[in-house]
Image (spheres, helix red, strand yellow):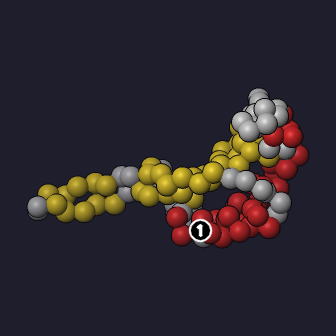
Amino acid sequence: MKRVTAIIRPERMEAVKDALFNNGVHGMTVSQVNGCGNQHGWKEYYRGTEVLLNMVPKVKIEVVVHEEQADAVVDVMIASARTGEVGDGKIFVSPVDEVIRIRTGERGDGAI
């Protein structure tokens, strides 16, 4: 199993969510997050002093899928999140050792 985590622009969240559902992903976790990357935020002035705001609002979408689905999920996320501008985000893929469905105690692939 693989966890695919995408950090994307908030305005692309609906497009990514819909694309994932249309491509057979049945569950996901979505979080509002703040961070910085190559953008390094922006400058504002507060009481005449320049302040660097380096935390940019983003959305984090996490899905856990069968290993053979991971590449397709990444491709769907890229296609639906990309604007071509700096700040489109990042995707991280990591292994998942175990999944347990709390309600039934089911483990492994069947618990996804």
The part of the image, by quadrant, that contains residue 13 is: bottom right
Front residue (pair 14, 7): 14
The quadrant of the rendering that contains the N terminus is: top right
In the rendered structure, the answer to whether residue 64 lies left or right of residue 37 reads right
What residue sits right under mark 1 in the picture? 12
Secondary structure at numbered mark 1: helix
Front residue (pair 76, 62): 62
Front residue (pair 49, 25): 25
The part of the image, by quadrant, that contains residue 57 is: bottom left
- Does residue 40 appear in this view? no
Q: Is residue 44 above or below residue 33?
A: below
User: At 78% from the left edge and 32% from the top edge, which residue is drawn?
Assistant: 105
Q: Is residue 36 above or below residue 48?
A: above
Amino acid type of the residue tagged 1 in the rendering: Arg
Q: Position of residue 67 (x, y in %)?
A: 85, 42
In the rendered structure, the answer to whether residue 52 lies left or right of residue 12 reads left
